[in-house]
Amino acid sequence: MENINIASVMMFLLMILCFSSNKPGIVGVRGEENDLIEATCRKTSYPDLCIKTLRSSPGSSGADVKGLAHIILESASAYCNDTYQQVKKLLNETKEKATRNCLEVCFQVYDLGIYEILTAIKSLESGDYDSAIQYANDGIIESDTCESSFKEFPEIPKSPLTDRNNGLTNLCSIALDMIYLFK
């Protein structure tokens, strides 16, 4: 009788642990997919952005780490395209010469960044991880180049694209961190 009670208590405690935990490695009601997102994102430079980005993507729930990196690169691609359109709009609205010069640099590098991030995605899909790393890193270089162009002109108090440039850098950094996890 005492053995049955001990076994029942142990089983009850085990069930509570399994169904209430959200720690990686323990499958509970939240499932392995969310645990993989959490565990993988915690190994990146920007874990909160990583988690937010992946949880907002419907395809992430069944993805492996390579699939998660693919989703992050797709997000970086969309972000790069959106920033390119914003730069284009700012160019049309801006008359001041120094700011226009900087925006033209940004327009060129974001145009190149669109190609580079798409190439990073294709390289990842084909298993050419070194090229995926190179092209994802190029996305960081392009956003840094855009941001740096504004520092060349002291009369421009602040880049209007700082947040966008940082956003692209952060997404590309997350993708790089993930690729290094399975490369």
Image: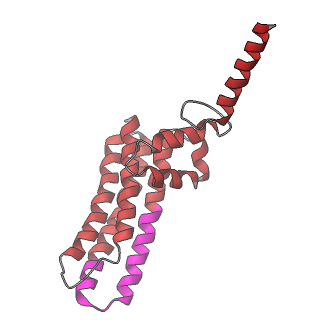
Instruction: Choose top left, top right, bottom left or bottom right for residue 101.
Output: bottom left
Q: Among all residues in the image, which is located at the extreme front?
A: 2
Name above or below for residue 14 compared with residue 38.
above
Q: Is residue 20 above or below residue 70?
A: above
**Residue furthest bottom as drawn:** 95
Residue at x 38%, y 83% (from the top left corner): 90
Where is residue 70? Give x, y as percent: 47, 48
Which residue is depicted at the point 59% across and 39% down? 33
Quadrant, the N terminus:
top right
Residue 50 in view: yes
Please tell me which residue is depicted at 62% across the width and 32% down the height of the picture: 27
Asked if residue 3 is among those painted magenta in the image, a careful observer would answer no
Q: Quadrant of residue 102?
A: bottom left
Magenta span covers which residues?
A: 78-104
Near-viewer residue (97 or 155): 155
Of 65 and 13, which appears nearest the observer? Answer: 13
**Residue at point 40%, 63% (across, down):** 167
Side of 162 where 52 appears, left or right: right
